[in-house]
């Protein structure tokens, strides 16, 4: 049930350009999904041509669809794609067909927009799994960030972003044996699933050795509880490089308040990662709120 029209929805009534913006969001997500698929196809063809097989990380194409999908997964994917196409065709017909439904009912327009965007992300999720951890990969995370950002603007709710890693473990770190590093990454991912519990929260493998989490409708108090829980969970993992030692979490955090969604999602993401880099400058666990 859509709630009473709020200030953001009123903006849509006052400015047709706002509707064009959210339609552009859908177009951008579709473009990203298609470019990802094209890139995977090109990578596969290159690997086949030069006999490369897996990529340098030994994980294969990070965004490729699973080599084998169950019949249930195929049905779900086809069904979601059909819902997406039906929803998109409906929006196009309403926007261009000379009807006045969206003019009179902006709640309906926004409801259709978020339904369509959700369908896009469901489809993208099939090609956005990190094979090592089973979490979403960076591609899937960036798409989800766009959706949650726009949802937070519409509903005027805070949005918290965490980007975190482990002290001494970076993307280019070669001090761990490859298998050791894989085990650490897998262990961290399982700990994160214990730390970030709400169904509405979203966790992803943000880079080779870093993770990110989106926490919708989460203020400073909630963010503090989650980050402290992460520090505790990561601090329980043995560090194979140091006998008797434990891993230490470094976390960058930022919270966009309900009335302060003034920048682009990519800029928000970049700012939080810079906070993580500052946290890495300290030895041991460190949380920096931007």
Image (tube, helix red, strand yellow):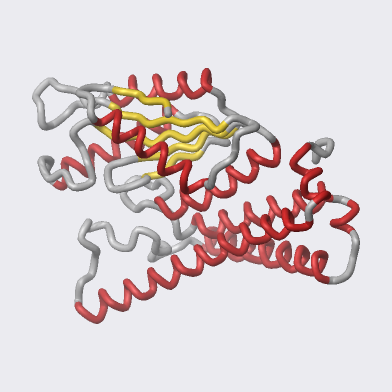
* 19 versus 258 height, above or below: below
Q: Is residue 232 left or right of residue 254?
A: left
Q: Nearer the viewer, residue 141 or 8?
A: 8
Quarter of the figure with residue 152: top right
* 46 versus 270 height, above or below: below
Q: Is residue 241 visible?
A: yes
Q: Nearer the viewer, residue 168 or 289?
A: 289
Q: Residue at x 19, y 26 (%)?
A: 238
Q: Is residue 112 left or right of residue 181?
A: right
Which quadrant: the C terminus? Answer: top left
Residue 35: percent from the left, percent from the top?
46, 68
Quarter of the figure with residue 29: bottom right
Q: Residue at x 26, y 78 (%)?
A: 48
Count how many numbered circles sit on residues in the image. 0
Q: Residue at x 42, y 63 (%)?
A: 65
Q: Is residue 150 left or right of residue 251?
A: right
* 237 versus 163 height, above or below: above
* 48 versus 157 height, above or below: below
Q: Is residue 199 visible?
A: no
Q: Nearer the viewer, residue 212 or 21?
A: 21
Q: Residue at x 59, y 48 (%)?
A: 147
Residue 256: percent from the left, percent from the top?
55, 33
Which quadrant: the N terminus? Answer: top right
Q: Nearer the viewer, residue 72 or 155?
A: 155
Residue 286: percent from the left, percent from the top?
30, 23
Q: Is residue 204 left or right of residue 281?
A: right
Residue 26: percent from the left, percent from the top?
63, 60
């Amino acid at each position: 049930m859509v709630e009473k029209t709020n200030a953001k929805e009123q903006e849509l009534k006052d400015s047709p350009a706002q509707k064009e913006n959210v339609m552009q969001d859908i177009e951008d997500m579709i473009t990203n999904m298609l470019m990802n698929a094209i890139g995977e196809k090109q990578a596969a063809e290159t690997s086949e041509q030069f006999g490369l097989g897996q990529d340098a990380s030994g994980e294969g194409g990070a965004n490729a669809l699973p080599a084998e999908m169950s019949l249930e997964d195929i049905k779900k994917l086809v069904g979601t794609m059909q819902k997406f196409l039906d929803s998109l065709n409906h929006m196009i017909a309403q926007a261009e067909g000379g009807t006045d439904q969206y003019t009179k009912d902006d709640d309906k327009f926004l409801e259709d927009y978020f339904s369509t965007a959700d369908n896009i992300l469901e489809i993208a999720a099939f090609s956005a799994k990190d094979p090592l951890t089973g979490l979403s990969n960076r591609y899937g995370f960036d798409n989800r960030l766009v959706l949650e950002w726009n949802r937070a603007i519409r509903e005027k709710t805070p949005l918290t972003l965490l980007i975190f890693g482990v002290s001494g473990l970076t993307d280019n770190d070669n001090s761990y044996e490859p298998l050791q590093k894989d085990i650490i990454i897998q262990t961290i991912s399982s700990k994160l699933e214990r730390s970030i519990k709400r169904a509405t929260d979203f966790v992803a493998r943000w880079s080779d050795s870093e993770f990110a989490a989106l926490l919708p409708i989460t203020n400073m108090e909630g963010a503090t509880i989650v980050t402290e829980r992460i520090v505790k969970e990561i601090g329980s993992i043995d560090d194979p490089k140091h006998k008797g030692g434990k891993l230490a979490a470094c976390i960058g955090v930022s919270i966009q308040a309900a009335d302060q969604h003034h920048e682009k999602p990519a800029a928000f993401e970049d700012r939080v990662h810079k906070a993580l880099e500052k946290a890495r400058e300290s030895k041991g666990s460190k949380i920096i709120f931007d």
